[in-house]
Image: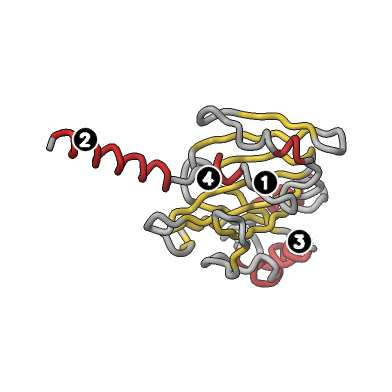
Amino acid sequence: MKKLIIFIATLFICMSTMAKVTVTNVLRTIPKEIVPYIDDDRRDEIGRFSSENDSLEIKNSLNGTMRIWTVSDDFARMELSESSMLQVKLLSTGDTTQIICVVKTITSPVAESEVRFYTVGWNELDGDFGLPDMRDAGAMLSSLTVRPDTMAEARYGELLKNIEPVIVNASFDAKGEVLTLGLGIPFTTKQVQNDMKAIIKQKSFKWNGKTFRLC
């Protein structure tokens, strides 16, 4: 009986381990459409991490270097090039199912992001999962700005006109399930940039197992 109990317990642990998907697992199969310029031989190197906080450098076909950092079991950050960054976050849905959230950011000249969702098999999912439509410039401008009490309405209106085009950036909290959105500040004088920083407000959204909710 004792041996049977030990066998069942061991089997349960093995099954639990097999069911667990980590960011390392999904990085090994990340599609070429998401991580371009990496040939098959180099792609085999993706996901070869020994532990959290490990990092890896991979040469791409453009003679550049892609850098990957694993921060936790469910989060990795990838520097695809000098001007492009990728964040990969595994989100739990409350059972054994997980989905992948990918944040791709063009960092230059002004940081601009797109957010997409996938199954752990890298099939793209429809829907925004509670996040605002980042392509709706008017809605994002209204949502991510606020007039300080000390600022005149006329000045506030002038600054809003300077935010053209409306560029939204997104970033995950590496250790949590919080995604923060903000506006990019266009190139202008230092004084105007400081004034614009005063009216821009970031918004954070926390994953609750089914959708993102405003924090």
Image-based side of 55 in relation to 62, left or right: left
Q: Which residue is mark 4?
A: 173
Q: Are marks 1 and 3 in contact (CB under 8 Å)?
A: no
Q: Which residue is mark 1?
A: 86
Label 3 vs label 4, nearer the camera: 4
At label 4, which amino acid type do we have? Asp
Task: Give the mark nearest the N terminus, 3 or 4.
Answer: 3
At label 3, which amino acid type do we have? Ile
Q: Say which quadrant the N terminus sits in.
A: top left
Q: Nearer the viewer, residue 58 or 143?
A: 58
The answer to which quarter of the image holds residue 168 is: bottom right
Task: Give the mark nearest the N terminus, 1 or 4.
Answer: 1
Mark 2 residue element: helix
Q: Which residue is mark 2?
A: 6
Q: Which residue is mark 3?
A: 163
Residue 192: x and y, percent?
A: 76, 51
Label 4 vs label 2, nearer the camera: 2
Question: Disc 2 to disc 1, how far (Cα)?
Answer: 43 Å
Question: Disc 1 to disc 4, how far (Cα)?
Answer: 13 Å
Task: Give the mark nearest the N terminus, 2 or 1.
Answer: 2
When the figure is inspected, residue 71 is found, relative to residue 157, above or below; the finding is above
Residue 47: x and y, percent?
A: 61, 36
Residue 146: x and y, percent?
A: 60, 62
Task: Give the mark nearest the N terminus, 3 or 2.
Answer: 2
When the figure is inspected, residue 55 is found, relative to residue 23, above or below; the finding is above
Q: Are marks 2 and 1 in contact (CB under 8 Å)?
A: no
The mark tally for this picture is 4
Q: Say which quadrant the C terminus sits in.
A: bottom left
Question: Disc 3 to disc 2, how far (Cα)?
Answer: 64 Å
Give the residue displayed 61% in from the left and 43% down from the top.
27
Label 3 vs label 2, nearer the camera: 2
